[in-house]
Image (spheres, grey):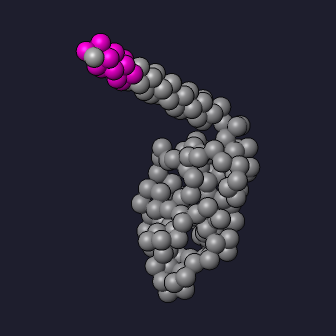
Amino acid sequence: MFIEKQVKYSGDVISCNGDEIKLVVDSNIVKVKLFNVLLNEDVCPLVYNAHEVMFEVGEYGTVVNEVSAYVFLDDVLLQKTIVEEELGIIKIDNPMYEYYSVIHEEQLEVSSSVEIIESSNHYQRDRANKMIGIMTIIYVILLIIIFRRKVLNFIKF
């Protein structure tokens, strides 16, 4: 089945496992992964309790072996519900993503989730600074070795 981006598809739920939902869409089985959320709890009860399940692959979503998409349960964006009920957080903070503003706005209202993201960003900055420091030390050591050899070779002549 060919799946177009930015088109909503409706399907019947076959199974749900973590962040993957298997749906039957037009007699085809489609594996749908939730786009741009990190889960810390199971969302399958929400999926199974919905009357209608739809998905939409955004411009940045993938359509390969499985579909990375926004999921709608009874016309409500599941990713927004996940953030709202603190079942997960936004994976990549990118305002270019469709529905980003809706999900991000919800995340700002949930203070504990924002603290998780801020601590994650802080960790990434610390890690980057450490790597820069290590690379600088290695560069200086290499310069000393190269310079020392050139000086010793110059003295020999």
Front residue of 46/129: it is 129
The answer to whether residue 13 shows anywhere in this view is no
Q: Is residue 6 magenta?
A: no
Asked if residue 108 is positioned above or below residue 142 in the image, the reply reads below
Rendered location of residue 149, percent (x, y) = 30, 20
Asked if residue 1 is positioned above or below residue 40 in the image, the reply reads below
Q: Which residue is pictured at 48% across the width and 75% down the height?
A: 30
* Residue farthest along the top direction in this orientation: 155
* Residue farthest along the bottom direction in this orientation: 27
Of the 4 image quadrants, the one containing the C terminus is: top left
Rendered location of residue 15, percent (x, y) = 43, 68
Front residue of 104/14: it is 104
Residue range (magenta):
141-156
Find residue 146 and report its image quarter. top left
Asked if residue 142 is positioned above or below residue 92 in the image, the reply reads above
Q: Which residue is pictured at 61% across the width and 61% down the height?
A: 60
Find residue 141 and report its image quarter. top left
Front residue of 39/2: it is 2
Rendered location of residue 69, percent (x, y) = 58, 64
Asked if residue 104 is positioned above or below residue 138 in the image, the reply reads below
Q: Which residue is pictured at 71% across the width and 49% down the height?
A: 95
Rendered location of residue 9, percent (x, y) = 62, 76
Give the main secondary structure, helix, strand or loop, of the magenta stretch.
helix
Q: Which residue is pictured at 63% across the width and 51% down the height?
A: 81
* Residue farthest along the left direction in this orientation: 156
